[in-house]
Image (spheres, grey):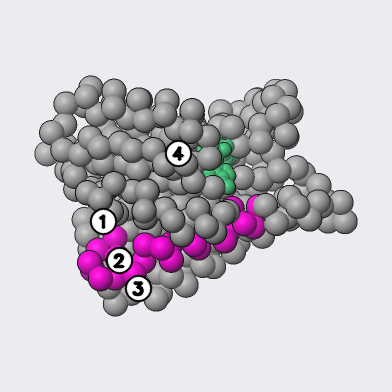
Amino acid sequence: MSVFNTSRLHGKTVLITGASSGIGAAAAILFAKGGSNVILTARRMDALEKVQQECVAAHQEAGVQHGGRFTVIPLDVSDRDQVASLPEKIPADLLNIDILVNNAGYVVGVDRVGDISLDNMEGMFATNVFGLIALTQLFIKNFRERRTGHIINIGSIAGKEPYAGGSIYCATKHALRAFTAALMREVVDTPIRVTEIQPGMVETEFSIVRYRGDKSAADKVYTGLQPLVAEDIAEEIVWAASRPAHVNIAELFVLPVNQASATINHRSNT
Ligand SMILES: NC(=O)c1ccc[n+]([C@@H]2O[C@H](COP(=O)([O-])OP(=O)(O)OC[C@H]3O[C@@H](n4cnc5c(N)ncnc54)[C@H](OP(=O)(O)O)[C@@H]3O)[C@@H](O)[C@H]2O)c1
C-alpha cells in the first residue's frame, strides 16, 4: 500500500478554472499524473495549451492506465455568457464532472480605501466571487442528480485575516469563505463534498499581477523567506480530492514555515 493512494482519482473528470498558470496549472498536471481527465480553463489559450502538453507528458510518465483526456477551453469566469455556454464546449464524454476546482482569482494593487479603482473592485469581485458562484451553480444540480461531486474552492489567508492595502481582495476571499461554508451546510444530506483551501504566500504569477507586471516589486514579497510553490498547494488539492468518499476535508490552511499570519513572517535578511 502506498502512503498517498491516488487510485480514487482514476478516471475522474476534473474541471479547473485558472489552469493556465500557478496553482491551477500545477493541480492539472498532478491530476494528470494521478490518472484523471482534466478540463483546463482560463483566458490565455496559449498558456493553457502548454499546460495541456505538460499534462500529457505527466500522464505518460506516470504510466497510469486511467484518465488521460486533457482538453482546453477558453473561459473568462467573470463573463456570464461564457460561463453559461461552457457545457456546450465540453466534450460529451467529459460532461459528468467529478471534481470542480474553483481556482481562478487575482488581486490588483495595494491601494487604500479612498484610492481604489471601482473597475478593479468590480473585476476582483466578478472573478473571485461571482465567477466562482456561477461555476458552482452550473454543476451543482448535476452533482445532486448523480449524487456525487467535489467542489474545491481556492480561498486564501486573506479570507481569514484582512490586511491593510488588500481590502477588496480580502473582502472577495471572505465572501468565498462564507459561500463555501454555506454550501457545505446545504449539501450535508448528500454525498457532495465541499472543500476550501486557504494558502498563505505562494510564489506564482499572483504578485506580478498584483504589482501590474512589476517583477522586482513582486520578487520583494518573497525576499528572505521560502514561500510555498504552486505544487505545494496542488498536492493539497489532489490530496483532498483523493480521500475516501465519506471524508470531507472542509478546510486546509497552508502556510510557508516562516509565515504565521498575513503580516507576521520571518525573513532571514531583516
Ligand atoms: N499566490 C498566492 O500567494 C496565493 C495565496 C492565496 C490564495 N491564492 C489564490 O490562488 C488562486 C490561484 O492563484 P495563483 O497564485 O496560482 O496565481 P496566478 O499564477 O496568477 O494564476 C491565476 C489564474 O487565474 C486565472 N484567471 C484570472 N482571472 C481570470 C478570469 N477572469 N477568468 C478565468 N481565469 C482567470 C489566470 O488565467 P488567465 O490570465 O489565463 O485567465 C491564472 O490561470 C487564486 O484564486 C488566488 O487568489 C494565491
Alpha-carbon distance for marks 3 and 4? 26 Å
| Mark with earlier residue (1, 2) | 1
Q: Which residues are magenta?
A: 124-149
Alpha-carbon distance for marks 3 and 2? 13 Å
140 is higher (above) or lower (below) than 236: below
Q: Name which residue type carries label 4.
A: Ala
Nearer the camera: disc 3 or disc 2: 2
Taking the image as drawn, is residue 7 in sight? Answer: yes
Residue under pointer 2: 142
**Residue 161 location in percent, x, y?**
64, 56
Mark 1, secondary structure of its residue: loop
Alpha-carbon distance for marks 2 and 4? 22 Å
Residue under pointer 3: 187
Q: Name which residue type carries label 1.
A: Asn
Nearer the camera: disc 2 or disc 4: 2
Q: Badge 3, how many Cα within 10 Å: few under 14, some, many 20+?
A: some
Outermost right residue: 114
| Mark with earlier residue (3, 2) | 2
Please tell me whether residue 144 belongs to the stretch shown in magenta.
yes
Q: Is mark 3 within 8 Å of ligand 1?
A: no
Nearer the camera: disc 1 or disc 3: 1
Residue under pointer 1: 96
Residue under pointer 4: 19
**Residue 211 location in percent, x, y?**
73, 34
Principal secondary structure, stretch drawn in magenta:
helix
Q: Badge 1, how many Cα within 10 Å: few under 14, some, many 20+?
A: some
The answer to whether the residue labelled 1 contacts the one labelled 2, judged by CB atoms less than 8 Å apart, is yes
Quarter of the image where ligand 1 sits: top right
